[in-house]
Image (cartoon, grey):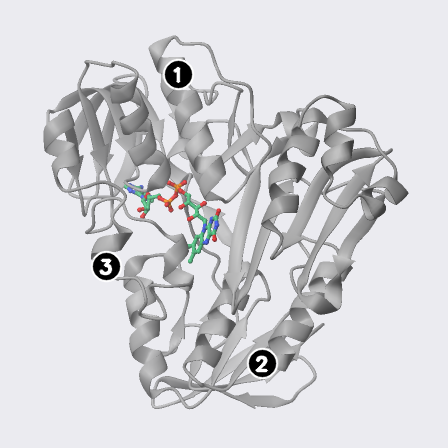
Amino acid sequence: MNSTSDILIVGAGLAGAQVAVSLRQGGYEGTVGIIGDEPHAPYDRPPLSKGYLRGEVGRPDLALKSDDFFGDTGVELVTGRTVTEINPADRMVTDDNGERFGYGQLVWAAGGSPRRLSIPGAELDGVLSLRSLTDADRIREAAGSARSAAIIGGGHIGLELAAAFRHWNVPVTVIEAQDRLLARVTCPIVSDYYHSLHRNAGVDVRLAAGVDELVGEDGRVCGAVLSDGSLLTADLVIVGIGLVPNIQPLARIGASCSNGVDVDSDGRTSIAGIFAVGDCANREHPYAGGSRVRLESVPNATEQAKIVANAILGQPQASPAPPWFWSHQYDTKLQTVGLLAGHDEAVVRGDIGSGKFSVVYLRNGVVIALDCINNVRDFARGKLLVQEGVRTTADAVRESADLKFILDSVGAA
Ligand code: FAD
């Protein structure tokens, strides 16, 4: 790599790769370098807990860009190096080999690392987490000989993993500290639906349950002591309790950080010449009334990367899109659009028992979010409802066959 890049991107994940792509698509002719700490070129993470884990998606299919991309576009990629220090006065970064790289502008795209458990036994063999391709390979290998597994954390990734264990016919227990699954991201109606889905698939779901200790034999995990004192047998434990944003070098140089590194509407941090994107960035979000949110999703990472590329190119920003997310568990496809925090009504459309329904979230009569379960049509229309901030009533939402008349009423269909 050049010792100095006009644009230096730290983190060879989705957001970092998308910044490089968008810069070149926008006609940027300066030098662009990417430094990533994994041994791989940028790849897609969502299949790691879905098709890749189950062996249905091959490794080559995970690549975000073809082998030719970097050569053809002159984007220089260095893998297997961790950036440990930033010196904003000299516009230099230093990696874990002590090598220094200069930058004109720096884009921090370092994502996050799995939150660790701080209980006795957390370091035993057989205690794993899932963020990277290496993690997914480890889980796949360990699952081959596991007699029973425990997943600590009932969020989307934990539940996708539970579905994979049932696919492999491995008995699995999900241990969730809250009194319902997915408590951080959805309403009780959707939580209950997912609880039934997993219970019917044979998952042992323990709610309002903590883990005090992991116990082992010969250095290998063999069980978990739960907060009620009971012992759960498991020779594979996956910890899925969230993400810690990778922002330490930025925090050390005094960048404003709260939940992640704070960025403005152009993705700029508080340090001159440094942008941040993706899972590590805490952005002012128009769909959160301008408050800061740190989102962990593919659409968010992609959108933020385009915003930063536009800011570097001096191009106008596109209108912000409503945030969205998806999850696949068994044959159930969830699509969520909008941010549901602060809703005062959750209106169900369709028959929950049929496995195809939506929940529309209203605040003061305005549609702010939808959870769509196996309901692609509601999701497509719902995106527009959220984008337009459509005002309606619970009855209208419930009774509308296809949400279209609500859109027609604002001329947005
Ligand atoms: P990352 O993709 O994590 O990339 C950051 C990169 O930077 C990593 O390679 C990291 O190792 C590297 N790095 C970190 N520190 C340094 C450093 N100091 N120096 C150099 N390199 C560094 N989103 C959805 O919308 N739908 C889904 O269904 C979905 N499923 C998911 C399933 C799994 C198992 C996971 C892990 C994530 C899933 N996501 C999903 C989230 C989505 O993948 C992330 O939001 C997205 O990858 C964020 O991109 P990013 O570039 O910000 O971070």
Question: Above or below — where is 252 with respect to 275?
Answer: below
Q: Position of residue 20 (x, y in %)?
A: 27, 27
Secondary structure at numbered mark 3? helix
- The answer to which of 171 and 126 lies nearer the viewer is 171
What residue would you read off at disc 2?
203
Q: Amino acid at mark 2?
A: Val
Residue 323 found in image quarter: top right
Q: Are marks 2 and 1 in contact (CB under 8 Å)?
A: no
Question: Above or below — where is 361 with respect to 1?
Answer: below
Q: Position of residue 308 (x, y in %)?
A: 40, 22
Whole-Å distance between the Cαs marked 2 and 1? 46 Å
Question: Above or below — where is 206 with respect to 194?
Answer: below
Q: Position of residue 136 (x, y in %)?
A: 33, 65
Q: What numbered label is drawn on residue 373?
A: none
Whole-Å distance between the Cαs marked 1 and 3? 32 Å
Q: Residue at x 25, y 21 (%)?
A: 24
10 Å crowding of disc 3: few (<14), some (14-19), many (20+): some
Q: What numbered label is drawn on residue 310?
A: 1
Whole-Å distance between the Cαs marked 2 and 3? 28 Å
